Amino acid sequence: MSDSPFATAPLDPSEKPVLDSILIIRDKLLLLKQDKSTYVKSQDVLPLYEQVIEQVSKLNGIRKEGQKQLELNRVDTVLDDCFQLISLFFLTIGRNNEAPAVYSMASTINRLLDHLKEAAFYSQKDLVSMGQTLDNMTETVERGKLTYSPHLVTLLEARMQTCKNQLAELQEYLKKIDPGLVPTWEKLVSLLRSAAALNTRSKFAKTELEQLRAQLLEIQATMKDGKLPAEDGSIPERQDLVVPLLERCLLWCDIIEEKRGKIDERFQDTYDKLIEIRNHLEKLTMTQAWSLRETDLYMWQRKLDRIDDSRRGGNFLDTEGKPADLHTQRTMLYLLRRGYAYIYQLLISSEPVSEALLPIYNQLMTLRRCLLEVKKSGGVSNPRELYPYSMKLNSIDNMRVDGKFTIGKDIPEGQGNVIGLLSECYDLAYELRTAAEDDADDSD
């Protein structure tokens, strides 16, 4: 497996029993993750969650009596593994709106915000999405205060507060940009990302790069005395934020043209790993509804974490401790950030339905989309055209036992969401059928 991130502080001997216990728990979680022979149930996950909380309670007791620890040691990193896995398991069993499910998202947002700050270019849209997600996470943790351990709640609140502080700092930076220059800033951020994506492709046409450069030169051509104008022709303040970004974009295009996707061979192995991670996660975003088990993200998270934590002073170093050149540095940082962005996208897209019910849920989602498309295109001319949809809905409805979708004797999580979607599909079909009958009556 991909091991947990680096630990720096030495282990206190009194913490050794806790470490031994959580290593066993982590192994159990990993075995459960790897077992694809059956779906994961709440009763598989909750006892392991309780065992982790018990060890956290012991650890807090040890550290309360001793000197306050400032650096992470092996216990902290293995605990992080356990909480990451439990969080992803809660998503897998459809308990997305419960406090433990928040942990993995908080870790991912923390990484993303760190990278946005380091890159020093991002759009308001990036921050709005994460801000809304953090608000939802806060509500989830608030609801869980009476249900879940104070140890977990305190940990989650601290992590979310760190993210909120980071977010506020990034928002403050964007506020410095004059409103008249915001459209130019957003355009430059988009162009720089497009150029970075182009640079990671094994082959690209020179015309693609030229099209990006042409847009940059078009922006540059509007400058007056080295300053960028607003849309109304005025010259806004704080040019020192936007003009350097334009220069950075143009320089990056020149470097891409010179390198033609060739990476410094000292870093080829790391680059190949990042490409593999990016490609796999990108594929998952396209097939998520049918192929993703959220716990599978753990391995990819950890691979990214190991690469990210291996940097020193923000730089990728070779075996001799020498830093990468500018092209290699920026290319690998882009891939690293892209990987975390894909994980974020997959986490927020996770449906609050157990993996056992996902096949039914996905079929209903497809039916709903089809019925909405039929409605959008003007409905049906004859109620008979709805027979295929009605037959499929009835076949799904007939799978219920005493009003619930069961797997054997189990009643998986997410019943309300699946039944609500089934009802919505019935309502859409009824609405379309009624409209078709009314049209037929009018014609008669």
Image (cartoon, rainbow, N blue to C red):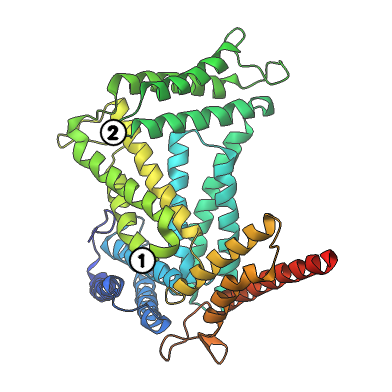
Please state if 250 lies on the left or on the right of 306 as rendered.
right
Which is more toward the observer, 279 or 149? 279
Name which of mark 2 and mark 1 comes first in the sequence: 2
In this rendered view, identify the residue nearer to me: 177 or 418: 418
Identity of the residue drawn at 38% across and 37% down: 334
Quadrant in the picture for the N terminus? bottom left
> With respect to residue 306, does 332 lie above or below?
above
| Coordinates of residue 204 in the picture (x, y in percent) | 34, 28
Amino acid residing under circle 2: Ser
Q: Amino acid at mark 1?
A: Thr
- Mark 2 is surrounded, within 10 Å at the Cα level, by few (under 14), some (14 to 19) or many (20 or more) other residues, namely few
Q: Nearer the viewer, mark 2 or mark 1?
A: 2
Q: Residue at x 54, y 49 (%)?
A: 165
How far across and down, in percent of the image, does residue 400 sit?
53, 86
Mark 1 element type: helix
Q: Residue at x 58, y 61 (%)?
A: 369
Could you say where residue 245 lies in the image, as x and y percent from the top left? 50, 24
- Tell me the distance, in whole angstroms, between the alpha carbons under discs 2 and 1: 30 Å
Circle 2 sits on which residue? 202
Q: Nearer the viewer, residue 387 or 167?
A: 387
Numbered tag placed on residue 295 in the rendering: 1
Quadrant showing the C terminus: bottom right
